[in-house]
Image (cartoon, rainbow, N blue to C red):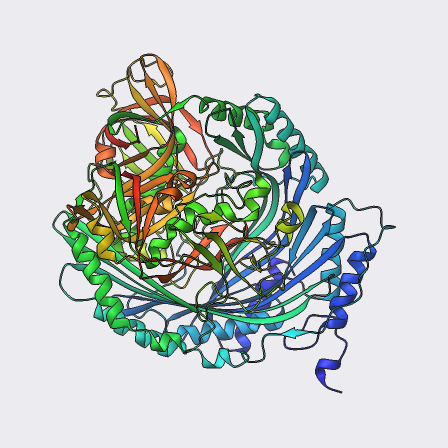
């Protein structure tokens, strides 16, 4: 069945059950992936998957939902019936409606879709990449975590009011995580991830080079003394921390009382005036972009922090109604609709006169800690309290030399961190979760075991 | 003729599918596979969320699918699909064969048909009718969240319940033919407390397997008191000072340290990757002699217990470490094939879309001889970790986990609550430092995410003392 046929089938089944108001979201995917181990294929995987989520509104306008992988005629009917039963328990305290923008036209770039290259080519490319990475340095002994995959998927949203949105696209991903070993030293490990619309779009050489350089940079390591340090966050690590605390901009989290912000926080000064942060799911560099969200609202660029002050929150249909604004294209589709950012873009604003521009990660000669990658976000972030304590991969720059930090955590408070930004470098880097320049923060606590 | 005797062109749950399964396995072997495994599941899940004094989400879901794995020598090809027809399953077999590039089908393995059906479902077929209804769940969750409202500093109250019912059929070319029904229920309570600039949170999760009545018996009042007290104790807590110090880890979920620090490194998947420091340490001392550690899937009702694993093997009780000596690895079919370590009934997967891998079940440190007070009294300056958050282990064996509720130990006594602590270290270095084990072993449920998805597990331990560990703080 194609997406139009499924919509028709749901419509007919809903009519037969006397369900007048419904919507659904569906995704259909075919995924292929390979892993290798020292030149040999390890696991080759293919999957065909379909997920259908149906919401129905009962006569009291309460919503019920059901999710299923069974899109047969009987499966669809069962899902509608279950959703109808669930609607008896719909949230009486906060209503849900169709997005008022679900039928608006979408101004979106052409969605890029590639053809499958097939398992054999995936395997050949990954084998070659593994060999090149191991040969790139004598200390790199293996690539224990690796994978090359390609996915082809279609997403649909439709409702009983006539909204119908659909797009299909492709995506490929390569990850290489190398392990280096030297006599009398602990093993060191690091890696790289690259995305593309198709396998042929992935810069494999750059992934190998990045994984190799990062791993080698950690061979010469030492423990660090517990103290407060000047910190330079890599683009990846700064985006990690902003995403971890994105509940600050999330209207759903604000309503639920789990955000550091409140309804009146628009305009609140969070950081130096030099900082701008946007959410831009449609950014041309965002391989994972989607033209609409789970409720059918078009995706758009939204300013979250403008010159250091909160400018907007991200919304679903229901949170937007509560805040008396319009949905922003950040909703999921659920019994309780979740809200989440798409793709964060961090920029230096034009009010950047107070920045210490001498702080440049490639040229600064003073002492600082370079945080390459933050780990264990799920364990070390207390988003509702604003605190974090996170292990990281990083380097200590001191007296013109750099040395890898053996094992350490960085701890602090997100508001303190944002207020203590002392430089935003000019060059932005595209990562898998957004775009950011290097960001310098003064006086964060590092715990080491020196 | 009984419906179960009709030869079907589609997998039918609750019926005999032997002929169809044999046909598919014969097909794979005939194409040159060394081994063919079929895992089929049918799920019926529900979750309910109560916030403050309202039910804000009820989410039922159901689905079915199959995962087909083909081995050729040590390589495996895995295909998952929602299509349970004969045509769909055979197409998946062909796809796996093609992926593995099997062209030589002359050297055929022998498939003698499936063994007698081992049906673990017999006593479980009524579970779906015995579990609490959405109405019953909602009522109890609302009573629970009401119990959390003990003062005006509690600003957010949540109660959540989820129930997963999974019916599985497992068949493979070594003759394995098994059916089972699994039931898992979890319930959790969360609060956020606030007073001026101070904020804290508290949470607890409870879980069971195979016990449809368990949610009804859950003591929500005791759970609510525990969560409330934890949030109040931590509300005005200072941030912990970072450094190296001795710590006492509480029992129950304190066992996450062993799970993360050592348990993952004893899975054969880690040997396959070459990422465990314990690979060649069998029968060698890897931990303090006070440490005996076990992984098993047989404790009745525990969250990680199974009648049969996802490869059709009954779980065993595996003594991983005995008095500090490494005795066994946790192994699945691929692990046995690639590392030589015998299967332990630990082949597990989140669902049909993952290939099984060696995974922990109920994993705990055995009890010792000391009381909790003995452990605390032995420390002049350290940290007591009463409640642990999540954690992870990296590719080089480095682990970390968050302390949700911690107290300073001064001169053998518990003193001020502290927050923001993270414990970090390396398994190889920390295991020899577990010098004292208490006599109060208790288990706690959790979810473990790894190569074959998220699976239900139990962690556990008595109170234990670690002589020195890095505590991340401010």
Position above or below: B185 against A317: below
Q: Position of residue A41 (x, y in %)?
A: 68, 40
- Give the left or right position of residue B406, taking residue B279 as reference: left
Position above or below: A92 against B278: below
- Can the viewer see residue B323 in this picture? yes
Quadrant where the N terminus of chain B sits is bottom right
Q: Quadrant of residue A195?
A: top right
Q: Position of residue B276 (x, y in %)?
A: 51, 40
Q: Residue furthest left?
A: B196
Q: Nearer the viewer, residue B333 or A437?
A: B333
Number of marks:
0
- Give the left or right position of residue B88, taking residue A295 as reference: right
Q: Residue at x 59, y 58 (%)?
A: A50
Q: Position of residue A171 (x, y in %)?
A: 58, 41
Q: Position of residue B148 (x, y in %)?
A: 21, 66
Quadrant where the C terminus of chain B sits is top left
Q: Residue at x 85, y 46 (%)?
A: B104
Position above or below: A430 against B15: above
Q: Nearer the viewer, residue A366 or A23?
A: A366
Q: Quadrant of residue A132?
A: top right
Position above or below: B194 against A223: below
- Can the viewer see residue A302 in this picture? no
Q: Residue furthest right?
A: B106
């Amino acid at each position: 069945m194609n997406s139009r046929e499924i919509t028709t089938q749901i419509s007919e089944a809903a009519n037969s059950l006397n369900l007048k108001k419904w919507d659904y979201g569906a995704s259909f995917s075919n995924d292929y992936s390979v892993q290798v181990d020292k030149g040999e294929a390890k696991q080759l995987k293919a999957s065909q998957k379909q997920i259908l989520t149906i919401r129905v509104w009962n006569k009291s306008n309460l919503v019920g939902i059901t999710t299923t992988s069974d899109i047969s005629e009987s499966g669809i009917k069962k899902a509608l019936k279950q959703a109808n039963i669930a609607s008896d328990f719909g949230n009486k305290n906060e209503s849900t409606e169709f997005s008022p923008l679900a039928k608006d036209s979408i101004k979106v770039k052409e969605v890029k879709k590639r053809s499958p290259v097939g398992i054999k080519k995936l395997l050949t490319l990954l084998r070659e990449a593994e060999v090149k990475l191991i040969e790139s340095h004598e200390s790199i002994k293996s690539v224990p975590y690796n994978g090359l995959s390609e996915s082809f998927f279609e997403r649909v949203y439709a409702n009983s009011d006539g909204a119908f949105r659909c797009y299909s696209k492709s995506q490929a991903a390569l990850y290489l995580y190398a392990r280096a070993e030297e006599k009398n030293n602990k093993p060191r490990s690091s890696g790289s991830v690259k995305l593309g619309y198709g396998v042929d779009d992935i810069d494999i050489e750059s992934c190998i080079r990045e994984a190799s350089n990062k791993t080698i940079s950690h061979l010469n390591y030492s423990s660090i003394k517990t103290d407060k340090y000047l910190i330079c966050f890599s683009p990846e690590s700064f985006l990690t921390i902003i995403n971890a605390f994105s509940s600050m901009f999330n209207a759903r989290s604000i309503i639920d009382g789990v955000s550091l912000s409140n309804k009146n926080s628009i305009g609140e000064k969070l950081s130096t005036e030099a900082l701008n942060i946007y959410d831009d799911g449609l950014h041309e560099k965002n391989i994972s972009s989607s033209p609409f969200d789970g409720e059918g609202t078009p995706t758009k660029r939204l300013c979250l922090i403008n010159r250091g002050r909160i400018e907007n929150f991200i919304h679903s249909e229901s949170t937007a109604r509560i805040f008396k604004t319009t949905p922003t294209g950040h909703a999921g589709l659920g019994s309780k609709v979740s809200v989440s950012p798409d793709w964060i873009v961090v920029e230096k604003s034009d009010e950047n006169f107070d920045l210490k521009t001498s702080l440049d990660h490639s040229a600064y000669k003073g002492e600082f800690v370079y945080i390459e990658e933050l780990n264990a976000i799920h364990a070390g972030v207390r988003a509702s309290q604003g605190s974090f304590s996170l292990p990281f991969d990083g380097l200590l720059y001191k007296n013109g030399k750099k040395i890898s930090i053996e094992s350490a955590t960085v701890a602090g408070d997100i508001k303190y961190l944002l207020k203590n930004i002392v430089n935003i470098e000019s060059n932005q880097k595209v990562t898998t979760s957004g775009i950011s320049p290097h960001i310098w923060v003064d006086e964060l606590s590092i715990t080491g075991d020196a | 003729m009984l419906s179960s005797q009709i030869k079907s062109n589609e997998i039918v749950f609750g019926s005999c599918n032997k002929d169809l399964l044999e046909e598919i396995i014969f097909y794979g072997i005939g194409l040159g596979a060394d081994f063919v495994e079929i895992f089929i599941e049918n799920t019926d899940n529900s979750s309910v969320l109560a916030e403050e004094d309202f039910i804000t989400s009820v989410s039922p879901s159901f689905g079915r699918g199959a995962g087909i794995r083909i081995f050729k020598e040590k390589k495996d090809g895995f295909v998952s699909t929602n299509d349970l027809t004969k045509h769909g399953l055979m197409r998946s077999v062909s796809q796996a064969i093609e992926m593995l590039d099997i062209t030589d089908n002359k050297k055929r393995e022998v498939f003698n048909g499936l063994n007698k059906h081992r049906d673990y479902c017999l006593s479980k077929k009524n579970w779906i009718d015995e579990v609490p209804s959405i109405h019953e769940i909602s009522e109890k969750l609302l009573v629970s969240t009401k119990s959390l409202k003990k003062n005006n500093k509690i600003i957010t109250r949540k109660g959540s319940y989820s129930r997963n019912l999974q019916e599985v059929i497992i068949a493979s070319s070594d003759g394995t033919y098994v059916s089972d029904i699994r039931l898992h229920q979890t319930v959790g309570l969360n609060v956020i407390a606030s007073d001026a600039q101070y904020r804290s949170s508290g949470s607890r999760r409870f879980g069971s397997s195979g016990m449809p009545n368990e949610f009804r018996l859950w003591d929500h009042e005791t759970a609510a008191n525990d969560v409330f007290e934890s949030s109040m104790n931590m509300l005005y807590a200072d941030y912990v000072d970072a450094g190296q110090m001795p710590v006492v880890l509480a029992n129950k979920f304190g066992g996450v340290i062993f799970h993360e620090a050592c348990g993952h490194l004893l899975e054969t998947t880690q040997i396959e990757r070459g990422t465990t420091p314990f690979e060649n340490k069998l029968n060698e001392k890897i931990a303090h002699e006070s440490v005996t550690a076990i992984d098993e899937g047989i404790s009745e009702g525990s969250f990680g217990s199974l009648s049969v694993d996802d490869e059709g093997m009954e779980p065993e009780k595996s003594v991983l470490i005995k008095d500090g000596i490494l005795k066994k690895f946790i192994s699945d079919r691929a692990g046995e094939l690639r590392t030589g370590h015998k299967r332990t009934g630990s082949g597990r997967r989140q669902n049909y879309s993952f290939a099984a891998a060696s995974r922990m079940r109920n994993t705990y440190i055995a009890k010792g001889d000391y009381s909790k007070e003995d452990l605390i009294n032995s420390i002049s300056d350290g940290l007591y970790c009463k409640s642990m958050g999540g954690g992870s282990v990296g590719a080089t064996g480095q682990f970390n986990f968050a302390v949700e509720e911690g107290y300073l130990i001064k001169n053998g006594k518990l003193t001020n609550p502290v927050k923001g602590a993270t414990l970090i270290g390396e398994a190889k270095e920390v295991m020899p430092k577990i010098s004292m084990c208490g006599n109060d072993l208790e288990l706690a449920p959790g979810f473990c995410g790894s190569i074959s998805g998220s699976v239900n597990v139990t962690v556990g331990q008595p109170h234990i003392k670690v002589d020195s560990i890095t505590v991340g703080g401010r």
